[in-house]
Amino acid sequence: IKPQLVNFDADKVLLCEKTDYLSVEENIFKFYNAAGYMDKREAIGALANNLKDHAEAQEVFYKALEDKSWHLRRYTLDQIDAADFSDKNKLLLALQKIVNSDMVSQVRQKALLLLCRTEPSRTESVCKQVIEKDSSFLCIAAAFDKLFAVNKTEAYRLATGFRSTENQAMMQSLSRIFADSATADNLEFIQKAISMNTYRTYLSNFKAIKSFLKKCSDLL
């Protein structure tokens, strides 16, 4: 009798590079029955290349998006190619649920970005919702980046309500928006962002001031 799964190094104690040759069915069984986070992560990684036209494998991904481990939820979002899912509306509903209610901002941000890529027509509405209701600067900054790409006027209008922020992610995002309009207030904000630079924001903020100065020269 063939076992449903042979879980080599189930306790994850061996110092080695392991390559499993498991079938789709074995990986599905592994996800539902193996106890550890790494087992589930390995199953998701293996199934990511076998999602198309495989409803049971797709269902594993939906279950993983609701897993108690936020690390697994985030990892699963990274593995999703929307084109592999047979029911696009079901995927969109799952992503919207995460954007609305997941407790971890890193997971909400990933879901937001994936939702915007999967259904570009919903970018403006979902990003405005995040900007107005989310409590995380990480998510709000990501929403501003996406909103600015589809509606600069609305992004600018909403951005003016965050001028007082000193959060690095927000300042980086808002600097790109304010660089598109040559006003004294916008210059002051970009200068503030540059004065608070970190290695993560240095290049982006100086690109913003360069873009702002070009806007000014175009007006001369």
Image: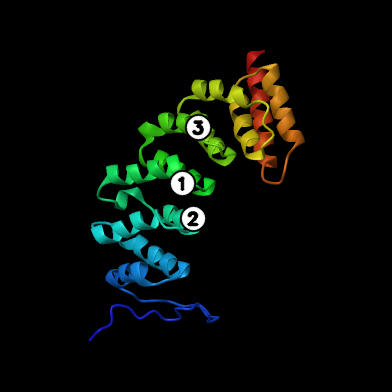
Name the residue at 70% across, 23% down: 187
Secondary structure at badge 3 equals helix
Residue 40 percent across, percent down from the top left: 41, 66
Position of 55 with respect to 136 (left or right) is: left
Find disc 3 in the rendering and name its residue.
Answer: 133
Q: Report the amino acid beneath label 3.
A: Lys
- Measured Cα–Cα span from mark 3 to mark 1: 13 Å
Q: Residue furthest right?
A: 195
Find disc 2 in the rendering and name its residue.
Answer: 70
Q: Residues within 10 Å of mark 3 (few under 14, many from 20)?
A: few
Dots 2, 1 in contact, CB < 8 A: yes
Q: How crowded is mark 1: few (under 14 residues within 10 Å), some or many (20 or more)?
A: some
Going from N to C along the chain, the mark reached first, 3 or 1, is: 1
Going from N to C along the chain, the mark reached first, 2 or 3, is: 2
Chosen colour scheme: rainbow
Secondary structure at badge 2 equals helix
Find disc 1 in the rendering and name its residue.
Answer: 102
Residue 201 percent across, percent down from the top left: 67, 41
Q: Report the amino acid beneath label 2.
A: Trp
Dots 2, 3 in contact, CB < 8 A: no
- Measured Cα–Cα span from mark 2 to mark 1: 9 Å
Name the residue at 62% across, 27% down: 162
Residue 26 percent across, percent down from the top left: 30, 73
Q: Residue 134 carries which label?
A: none
Against 183, is 131 above or below? below
Q: Report the amino acid beneath label 1.
A: Asp
Position of 51 with respect to 140 (left or right) is: left
Name the residue at 52% across, 25% down: 155
Against 112, is 48 above or below? below
Secondary structure at badge 1 equals loop
Quadrant of the image occupied by residue 116: top left
Q: Mark yes or no: residue 53 visible.
A: yes
